[in-house]
């Protein structure tokens, strides 16, 4: 009974978060996890028959989790933002500074790359998807900066961040299906 109550609470939270989105969303269940410790991938119970395509973003109620990288008829595979092969364009909510957050291979850590030593970043700054590159819609929470090291001898700062979504705990996710874009005239 307590398990069903918790699942009901997670579903309600997920549905509430989907109401604030401009895009169409589809609820999917995580039905598998890649057993390779060096890959951060999950298998979802939605596929091409549900309208899923490669490149769609997946989120939970806390933020961006990753993107769909392979689609079969009934299932799809998603790469999590913490995988070493993943990069996410982000920006700081406080001041709009842009950066690229890359996976480190650890579920609780991202790294910002090529951040100038003089960039206006603070521990605690919230990072959201910037929308650059067109892969992820702008404004989704991605991470919070947890560590900054400025070495005067280096051109770039070492910046680490903790993902906002629960990458190792969620069984239900939202797949974002962008609405039809109106061409600019």
Image (cartoon, rainbow, N blue to C red):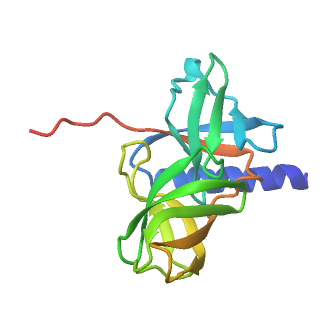
Residue at the extreme left: 185
Residue nearest the viewer, comparing 65 with 152: 152
The correct choice, above or below, for 104 with respect to 54 in the image is below
Image quarter (top left, top right, bottom left or bottom right) of the C terminus: top left
The image shows a total of numbered marks equal to: 0
- Whole-percent x, y for residue 158 in the image: 56, 72
Q: In this view, does 100 lie above or below 29?
A: below
When asked about the image quadrant of residue 180, the answer is top left
Q: Where is residue 47 in the image (x, y as percent from the top left)?
A: 61, 23
In the rendered image, residue 181, in percent from the top left (x then y), is placed at: 27, 36
Rendering quarter of residue 146: bottom right
Report the side of 130 relative to 37 (left or right): left
Q: Nearer the viewer, residue 178 or 108?
A: 108
**Where 171 falls versus 106 (above or below)?**
above
Q: Residue at x 83, y 37 (%)?
A: 35
Residue drawn at point x = 71 percent, y = 62 percent: 108
> Looking at the image, which residue sits at the far right?
1
**Residue 5, quarter of the rendered image:** bottom right
Q: Where is residue 119 in the image (x, y as percent from the top left)?
A: 40, 77
Residue at 40 percent across and 49 percent down: it is 137
Q: Is residue 116 left or right of residue 48?
A: left
Residue at position x 60%, y 68% in the image: 161
Give 157 or 78, whichever is nearer the viewer: 157
- The residue lying toward the viewer, choosing from 53 and 60, is 53
């Amino acid at each position: 009974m307590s398990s069903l109550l918790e699942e009901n609470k997670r579903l309600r939270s997920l549905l509430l978060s989907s109401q604030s989105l401009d895009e169409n969303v589809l609820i999917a269940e995580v039905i598998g996890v890649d057993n390779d410790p060096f890959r951060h991938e999950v298998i979802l119970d939605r596929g091409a028959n549900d309208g899923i395509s490669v490149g769609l973003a997946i989120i939970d109620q806390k933020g961006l989790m990753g993107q769909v990288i392979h689609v079969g008829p009934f299932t799809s595979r998603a790469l999590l933002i913490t995988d070493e092969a993943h990069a996410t364009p982000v920006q700081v909510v406080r001041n709009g500074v842009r950066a690229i957050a890359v996976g480190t291979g650890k579920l609780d850590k991202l790294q910002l790359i090529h951040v100038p030593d003089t960039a206006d970043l603070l521990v605690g700054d919230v990072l959201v998807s910037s929308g650059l590159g067109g892969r992820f819609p702008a404004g989704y929470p991605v991470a919070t900066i947890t560590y900054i090291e400025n070495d005067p001898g280096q051109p770039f700062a070492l910046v680490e961040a903790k993902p906002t979504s629960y990458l190792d705990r969620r069984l239900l996710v939202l797949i974002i299906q962008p609405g039809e874009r109106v061409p600019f005239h």
